[in-house]
Amino acid sequence: MAPAAGGEPVDLLEMALNYREQLSWHSTQLKELYAFVSFGSAFPRTFSSLVDSYNTRESGIKNFLLVSLALSDLGYIPLSIRLDSGDLASLSIYAKEMFREIGDRFGRDFSKIKVVASNDINEGTIRSLISKNH
């Protein structure tokens, strides 16, 4: 894919895999990474991912970050993840911590990446999420 400012196309998957190696995140699900890379290639200006298909902490959030790092190298800004199951408050807090940690490590401002929750959202769920600082 081409950088946001134009130029020669690069291999987004190769870039993401290089970050995977640098971070030693060898346990992330490759099929999931391939899906995120495909979506990032198709929609680099609006990159957002549903993080729900495998292990959210050890694969989904990390794979999202791998593609986000590669896209940011090309001048694109990742937008958000959507969590759809599990302990939404805990997962959202973990995701934000990872965004901050990886952003700091690689000199990126990932603080504006949104975490969106879906599933059985009702007034009680919202009150619970607020009470847990989601």
Image (cartoon, rainbow, N blue to C red):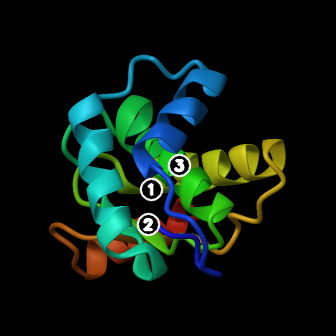
> Which residue does the image show at 41% across and 71% down from the upper left?
47
Residue at 44%, 66% in the rendered image: 129
Q: What residue type is labelled 3?
A: Leu
Q: Which residue is drawn at 65% across and 72% down?
A: 75
The residue type indicated by label 2 comes to Leu
Query: How far is the residue under mark 2 from the one under mark 3?
Result: 23 Å
- Which mark is drawn over residue 129? 2
Give the percent coordinates (x, y) of residue 99.
64, 53
Query: Label 1: few (<14), some or many (≥20) within 10 Å?
Result: many
- Report x, y in % for residue 38: 27, 57
Q: Are marks 2 and 1 in contact (CB under 8 Å)?
A: yes
Picture mark count: 3
Q: Quadrant of residue 54?
A: top left
Quote the CA–CA distance across marks 2 and 1.
5 Å
Question: Which element type, helix, strand or loop, lies under badge 2?
Answer: helix
Q: Can residue 51 be seen in this view?
A: no
The mark found on residue 65 in the picture is 3
Where is mark 1, residue-wise?
89
The residue sitting at 56% across, 65% down in the picture is 8
In this view, 40 is above or below 5: above
- Residue type beneath disc 1: Ala
Q: Residue 97, percent across and down?
A: 66, 48
Residue 55 appears left or right of 79: left
- Looking at the image, residue 11 sits to the left or right of residue 84; the answer is right
